[in-house]
Amino acid sequence: MTTDELISVLRGCYDNANRREVALAIHLFGIEYAAELDGQPINTIAEAGTGHRSYGTEIRKGMRLAKYVQMRAPSTK
């Protein structure tokens, strides 16, 4: 994926997240796209996608978690 595509995906995650779950959405973005994010300018992607450069830290947390977790669909209770 290109940097612009990653920014677009992150923007969608950020915009569609519940107000209380923004950080979670960013962590999940980092987990799901860890391979694509490797070698990319994370802080630039964070700032362009969310308006907050500091979310680069949250993306990196997700990237580090990626090798330990597996994505699954949310439960529907």
Image (cartoon, rainbow, N blue to C red):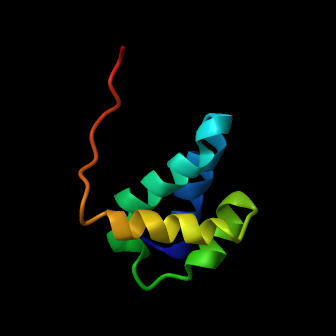
Q: Position of residue 63 (x, y in %)?
A: 39, 68
Q: Is residue 51 left or right of residue 59?
A: right
The spot of residue 9 in percent (x, y) is: 52, 55
User: Is 50 in front, or is 7?
Assistant: 50
Q: Residue at x 56, y 82 (%)?
A: 41
Q: Residue at x 25, y 66 (%)?
A: 67
* Depicted 10 relative to depicted 41: above or below: above
Q: Residue furthest right?
A: 51
Where residue 15 sits, quadrant-wise, is top right
Residue 32 in the figure: left or right of residue 69 = right
Would residue 41 be found to the left or right of residue 53 on screen? left
Which of these two is toward me, 56 or 51? 56
Residue 57 locus on image (x, y percent): 57, 71
Q: Residue at x 34, y 63 (%)?
A: 65
Q: Which residue is at the far bottom?
A: 39
Question: Exactly how many numbered labels are in the figure?
Answer: 0
Question: Percent position (x, y) of residue 37?
Answer: 43, 74
Give the position of the C terminus as an image quadrant.
Answer: top left
